[in-house]
Amino acid sequence: MLEIKNLHARIIDDGTEIIRGLNLSVKAGEVAAIMGPNGSGKSTLSYILAGREDYEVTEGDILYNGQSILEMDPAERATAGIFLAFQYPMEIPGVATMEFLKVAMNEQRKARGEEPLKIPEFLKRVKEAAASLSMDMNMLKRPLNVGFSGGEKKRAEILQMKLLEPKLCVLDETDSGLDIDALKIVSDGVNALRSPDRAIVVITHYQRLLEHIVPDTVHVLYRGQVIKSGDKSLALDLEANGYAGVIGQAA
Amino acid sequence: MNMHAQPQRTLAETALIDAFGERLSLLPGDGAVMVKRDDAIEAIKHGLPTRRVESWHYTDLRRLLTSVPAFEAGAVVKALAPVLEGSAVLPVLNGVSQTKLPEIDGVTVQRLSEKLTDGSAAPGLDSYGSDDAIGALNTAFVADGYFVDIADGAELEEPVELQNLQAGGQSHVRLLARVGAGAKAVVVERQTGEGDEALVSSVSQLVIGDGAEVTWLIVQEQPDTATHLAQFKAHIGKDAKLTLFVMNAGGRLVRQEVVVRTTGEGADFKLRGINLLAGDTHTDVTMVLDHAVPHTTSTEVIRNVVTGKARGVFQGRINVHQYAQKTNAKMACNTLLLSDDGEFSTKPELEIFADDVVCGHGATVTEIDHDHLFYLMARGIDEKSARGLLVKAFVAEVIEELDDEALVEALEARLDGWFSTHG
């Protein structure tokens, strides 16, 4: 479903190369974990997948269902089924959360040639999704993410993911800022989305999240490259021995 | 050597002076009113203000007012459905007040032409300074409008909507209101019209009694054929509250002056303004606020959206008088500049003669936040819609603060209307 080939990318502003020849392949139905120390390029990779303009791909390609997405803007990628759960979701004053959800769902439906949702159906879906994440509907009456706690923002991201039903989910450090109970709720939300036609990429520092969202594959990112891939035991190994060993082997 | 030689009159100045001569016999007014009119046209004969007059620095009226249309006595315009459902509508159509008016409990309405004829409107025709060009223009030509008297203690169940609707040509209107002590009212001042080139002057004068609460909404949606020169003047009494909401969403050349004075302790003034600027237009909001007694408060928040080649101005001057201790005043002007050809000038001024006050001001000019745009687009909202949501959000914040659902909904509908044609 996702194939990243020899990807090189840099920050446009200062030319710093962050991704340096990254290869990664994720199949439909797979949950892939990407781990790595601070500054290894994990968040950059998530932004590049979502199409953020601050980065420039200088070499290589990203194929999604066999098609390059490099020329697509973020909205086109999203309507094609790519979803990024942000590490730091933006607070947007003045944009009502419910209005935002409705516009986003209907824009995606429009792009797929579907009719807009009728209001009762829209409300029903939001209520069900919110209940499954133990979210208070009153929260959704506020402007988008404004005044939400760190944990509430992460839940709101997963809520959006449930409602938009993407095919490729990229979760950027969704565990940061979550207490144990919230981590369980969010993980259950993600696990409920596992399906044979959907791929999930989980970016995290810690093994902790992977106890709840058990990955099929684990990839270690270091200096903009995947330096080691394995199964879930690799994550346990990293937790026990740190990144130094893996980095040493690769060097 | 005479360095003060009068420059040659512009076409517009000449047209105004000629029009005064032609209109004079048609203008209502007793002797006192006619004296004020003469003084006013004298002021115009000295020339319209230029950028060398400080308060007109960013709106060089002499240069910008390139022509003045003739009066169109026969032009017809119809009253509009009100902005807020259920409002009692008092229309001024092509400069003329109406005789058939709705009954409003607690409110007495008089046609301004009568108050000019009997001279009772004369004291209000004085200008408030040598740079009061709008006041002078209006005083010279004003023929009609309304005087709305809201009785002491009256709490109006429904809003009152004053409509000043022009149909091309010139119209000069005054809207006077007295809000009695302890009264509560919501008033909409609707300024719009249709048709060919227009010159509108409109002066609203409000005296708010002790403990009264007034929300006054100016909704200006003139066509881009209109020059709209307006003034809003108010005195706020003891423990009285005035919320003035100004929405400019039209007009070719617009100046809205706001001249407010707190006259009793505990008075509170809120100014909330939205300027939606498009095309090749010029819009100026100029406020002069006098905190003239101790213990009064004010906040001013202006949000501007600038597109196309539009130019905008906000001047906010807060005078805190020497005895006006414990004044608390805060002013902010935020602009979203969406076009390289647009511009917005902000001039905050604080003149403080008291020593125990809290006053502040801030101004920002920004573009759309790229992080916000990315976030919305990453959810599948295309760039145009995402920008639209963010621009609307920027101004809607000011509206949502109004804390009255019917008001918020009605104003957001006006916003949507503007965005659907200019977005």
Image (tube, coloured by chain):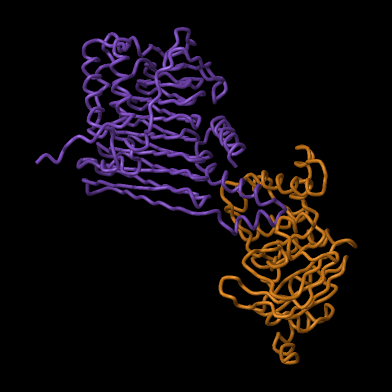
Chain colours: A orange, B purple
Q: Tell me the quadrant of the picture where the N terminus of chain B can be found.
A: top left
- Determine the residue positioned at 59% across, 76% down: A15
Residue A171 vertical position relative to residue B123 in the rendered view, above or below: below
**Percent x, y for residue B244?**
42, 33
**Percent x, y for residue B349?**
30, 47
Residue B228 vertical position relative to residue B334 in the rendered view, above or below: above
Say if residue B183 shows up in the picture. yes
All told, the count of numbered labels is 0
Residue B403 vertical position relative to residue A126 in the rendered view, above or below: above
Asked where in the image residue B422 lies, by quadrant, the reply is top right
- Determine the residue positioned at 74% across, 88% down: A246
Asked where in the image residue B295 lies, by quadrant, the reply is top left
**Percent x, y for residue B390?**
59, 48
Q: Tell me the quadrant of the picture where the C terminus of chain B can be found.
A: top right
**Percent x, y for residue A42?**
69, 74
- Determine the residue positioned at 82% across, 49% down: A112
- Determine the residue positioned at 51% across, 16% down: B77
Residue B116 vertical position relative to residue B312 in the rendered view, above or below: above
